[in-house]
Image (cartoon, rainbow, N blue to C red):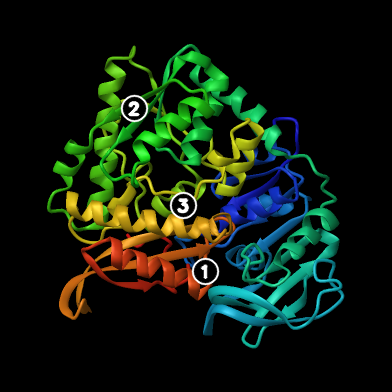
Amino acid sequence: MENIRPIIVLDFGSQYTQLIARRIREMHVYSVIVPCHLPFDDLAGMNPQAIILSGGPSSVYDPASPTCDDRVFQMKVPMLGICYGFQLMAYKLGGKVERAERREYGFAQLEISPPSQIFSGLESPLRVWNSHGDHVAEVPPGFRVTGRTENAISAIENPEAGMYAVEFHPEVRHTASGAEILRRFVEGVCGAAPNWYPRSFVDEAVERVRREVGDERALCALSGGVDSAVAATLVSRAIGDRLLCVFVNNGLLRKNEFEEVTAALRSQAHLNVRAVDRSERFLTRLAGVVDPERKRKIIGEEFIRVFEEEARSSGHPAFLVQGTLYPDVIESVSVKGPAATIKSHHNVGGLPPDLKFRLLEPLRELFKDEVREVGRALGLSEEMVGRQPFPGPGLAVRILGEITKERIRVVQDADAIVEQEIRGAGLYNELWQSFAILLPVSSVGVMGDARTYATTIALRAVTSDDGMTADWAKIPPAVFERISTRIVNEVREVNRVVYDITSKPPGTIEWE
């Protein structure tokens, strides 16, 4: 993509930064994220056709807050500020930003003040999603207010300078017409034409992998999910038989998954797959551990040790390929800006400090649906690319409390019933994820006129576009009834089934 002028997103630490780039790529326009502290000459050398300033958790008037080179605002390219980026633009250009008496988190009504190119034709008031504790008290010279909420100035612009800014988040699905607002900026203000497609990503990524790996060998950590399968296929296309794929049974896979996925990967993806069973060593390390972060880190470290052992018997490959996606990265560690850590993913925050491989993560800038499109472009089967996400630590984060073989069997049996019934109802492809969680909770029940005191299974099913936000799924009651009846009847250790109706945020999709 070196010859294409990108729309650059300057990252100031928002959890939603990648969503901005993703929404632009949905328009088939090439967009990249760079850290806000990128040297100005490097930024200018990328020849951007527009710059978007992301949100972030800081206050612009704090001396320690993230910022960018002042020359960014003199680049004479269209610019859009979002949330913190809105405040930074106002602050840097002579406006006033201060702590708000009434913070705005969640939904608000935006009253539009025409004329405005990015709001033209949209209904007012507009339902928008806010997340800020500061507000712009005075707009900078040359700007006019184009939108307000009950509590704050919410949109400003200076069309002559090509500068626009909004306090709310148009990149999240919660904002009505948010994608259209971004489209007005990208296509209307910037005049950007389509130039990015999954095939373009495949070609560029293959060349990038070839350059990075050179004549070395690589080992790929297969999980059985779409992410690692796509990553492996992509790298295989780049370096051929110098890639060895290792699929590890850590004892925390779904029911019968080790055998079924091994066969599918070998037949569908035509990869060189070595399947190894190391379940006993993983479960030994996890014995007595209940803290979810410790679980994740133990699993991440143990995976690496297994891969190191396999590498020693396979010509000592220099690279470890992982199917890391952007939601894994942004929830685990701050890599582009001062974003808050939500939880460590085993293949990001769970990696040991003495890692003997160089990491190769060709998908770490993509979201799940983009990865699926890349998988289709690579020729993977719909069965493979359509699988629901499964966490790297496996059932360890769906078993609350201690992990034992018996508890693993219980959640495997319950989860298999959930998948069978969801597929039978024709809902599998409509849901982002649907699964069972084993709770460390027992309750009284009655079965066959006898008292029971058994464990509880929680059901989780969500709809989502990207995994960054999610809504609980409104599954038909008849499906719930079949799932609950089957679990209680077929999984003897369970006498109660409950359903999680928490969205993300405030919850996460997985429980741990």
Q: Which mark is residue 275?
A: 2
Spatial distance from mark 2 to mark 1, Cα to Cα? 35 Å
Does residue 108 appear in this view? yes
Residue at mark 3:
330
Spatial distance from mark 3 to mark 1, Cα to Cα?
A: 24 Å
Q: Amino acid at mark 3?
A: Ile
254 relative position to 162: left or right = left
Dot 3 lies on which element?
Answer: helix
In front: 494, or 270?
494
Extreme-front residue of the structure: 448
Quadrant location of the C terminus in the rendered image: bottom left
* Mark 3 or mark 1, earlier in chain: 3
Label 2: which secondary element? strand
The residue indicated by pointer 1 is: 473
**Residue at left 35%, top 47%?**
254
Using a 10 Å C-alpha cutoff, classify the residue at mark 2 as few (fewer than 14 neighbours), some (14 to 19) or many (20 or more): some
Distance between mark 2 and mark 3 Cα atoms: 30 Å
Q: How many marks?
A: 3
Q: Quadrant of residue 488?
A: bottom left
Identity, as a three-letter code, of the amino acid under mark 1? Ala
Q: Is residue 432 visible?
A: no
Task: From the viewer's perspective, tell me whether residue 154 is left or right of residue 84.
Answer: right
